[in-house]
Image (spheres, grey):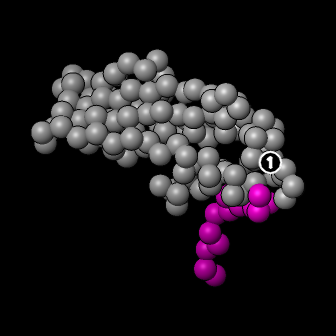
Amino acid sequence: MEETHKHRFSSYVSVSKNSSFIDWVLQNQSHIESSLLSAGLDFINEQGEDLKAPVTDLILDNRWHYIDKPARKQSYKGILQKNTHGVPYLKLTYYSFRHGGYSEHFKAKEVIKELWKQGREGVYKPIVPPKKPT
């Protein structure tokens, strides 16, 4: 996942080496939330099998939602929460009734860790199309 989503993490506000994680979170809350939602949407579409159309919006009400209507064999449920320190967290689970049942949980901590790492390193990787050979 970290490779496919790195390009989405490039518009954060970098922080000094002395800033705490909580300070960084408070300064970048909306960006962290939008990155989590974007990565969560990618996660659901990667997990889904033979979807007629990709999932374009997540309904985050902690209820199951089918992603392969009318077959109703695959679903997800999720909720976006904040802990007591204000750190956003996306709890998202994909479930398939195919193949005897299978579930996979979205790894929100990995997304947040990657954003934090990039903020600490001051990394900015703009999306640049590859140059064509001349």
Residue 43 can be seen in this image: yes
Q: Is residue 110 left or right of residue 73?
A: right
Report x, y in % for residue 17.
84, 58
Is residue 89 depicted above or below 17 in this figure?
above
Q: Residue furthest bottom?
A: 134
Q: Which stretch is magenta?
A: 120-134
Q: What is the magenta segment's predominant secondary structure? A: loop
In depth, the one of 61 and 73 nearer the eye is: 61
Residue at the image position 18 percent from the left and 33 percent from the top: 97
Residue at the image position 44 percent from the left and 27 percent from the top: 78
Residue 5 located within the stretch drawn in magenta? no
Report x, y in % for residue 119.
75, 54
Q: Is residue 132 left or right of residue 85?
A: left
> Counting other residues with Cα less than 10 Å from the Cα at mark 1, is it few (<14), some (14-19), or many (20 or more)?
few
Q: Is residue 10 left or right of residue 20?
A: left
Examine the image and state in which quarter residue 131 appears. bottom right
Residue at the image position 37 percent from the left and 46 percent from the top: 46
Q: Residue furthest left?
A: 100
In depth, the one of 35 and 120 nearer the eye is: 120
Q: Which residue position holds label 1?
A: 20
Residue 56 can be seen in this image: no
Q: Residue furthest front?
A: 84
In depth, the one of 127 and 99 nearer the eye is: 99
